[in-house]
Image: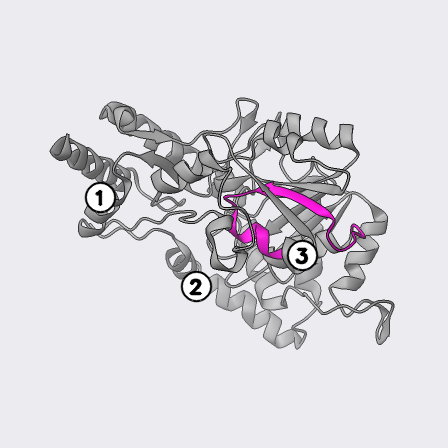
Amino acid sequence: MNLSFNHTKLKASKKKKEIIKHIGRVIDSGIFINGKSVQEAERRLKNYFGAKYFITCASGHDSLLLALQSLGLKKNDEIIFPVNAYPTAFPIFMNGLKGIPVDVDDNGQIDPILANKAITRRTKAIVMVHLYGLVGNLEKIIEICKKNKIFLIEDCAQSFGSRYQGKLVGTFGDIGCLSFYPTKNLGTLGDGGGILVKSKKQFNFLRKAVQYGEKHRYQSEFIAGHSRLPEIQATVLNLYLRKINEELLKRKLLAHYYLQQITKYGLNRYITVLISDKESDPMCHLFVIRAKMRDNLRNFLMKENIETFIHYPLNINRVCAFNFLSKNNYPNAEILSKEIISLPFHPYLKKKQINFIVKKIFKFYNKNH
């Protein structure tokens, strides 16, 4: 059995005829930017989340980049974020802001106590990253932001469909940022992003910021680049949206089945499955475990043709581009980076494939203990 980590090729292949049909319609329309497919995607996603405002953009990266710009922050204003959220750091620093990484809890989610301690008079926002599709103590983070009168931005790149206290994540903060990268819970065939907004002022800014700062064509009110979701990606996104609830349910059932099999084989002695806050209903993007002898396990699984990844092998303070950040003070994230491993996980995974994976993990630990 040869097990790939993700399902992007498989999903696209299964829907190939429909995809080609939808792309053909875009080609026939002759409109490849800001057309009906983008308008439909924005309308459908706005309704899906029950959001006041919603806008698409070119990528998940841009969704956070533009979201921060919409807040009218000044250079060196401080933004608190979890140290293990590699992609999240880049938009913060690219905006000329001062990113303040903080440590995480045992499940890789931002630690509210440490986030609170990191607040200074220059702190303007906390970026809460719902990493892996899990949700941390969102209630506490909301309380901290309200008490200190700072913005809450939810990075939902990996958590489309996750809920907290019955409500979709991305709708709690001032802004919610989405990614439609191909591997995400809701992806397309390239890059894509979206922004959930509550403030009309911020929404009006974003409408201009995705198109040269223009209020009307060639009437730019401020200097900006462009960040547009192409029509072709939008039409694929709309196609994938049709079956999204069905796919999300499959994710939930498969994550539960993984847990059952891990318990059945008594693997809890060697591995720990990362879990979500008790108030949440997570929608896993990745199935992440903490494993003893992690690197040896990965090598063993690779020889058995089981593809795995580490999300992420380096905390942001260990990345060369961010060598100005402190190398210390993140003990939990450091331990996690040496123990975590992401197992194959997607809606097209079969139970027999999960059985195969878990049996191989059992074989490894049975052999080495």
Mark 1 lies on a secondary structure that is helix
- Kind of residue sitting beneath label 1: Asn
- Kind of residue sitting beneath label 3: Leu
Residue 356 to residue 214: above or below: above
In the image, residue 199 lies at what x, y percent? Answer: 82, 45
In the image, residue 74 lies at what x, y percent? Answer: 79, 53
User: Label 2, label 3: how many angstroms apart (C-alpha)?
Assistant: 33 Å
Of tags 1 and 3, the one toward the viewer is 1
Residue holding disc 1:
296
Residue holding disc 2:
16
Mark 2 lies on a secondary structure that is helix
Tally of marks: 3
Q: Residue at x 63, y 63 (%)?
A: 58
Residue holding disc 3:
65
Q: Residue at x 78, y 51 (%)?
A: 73
Question: Badge 2, how many Cα within 10 Å: few under 14, some, many 20+?
Answer: few
Q: Which residues are magenta?
A: 71-91
Res 23 quadrant in image: bottom right
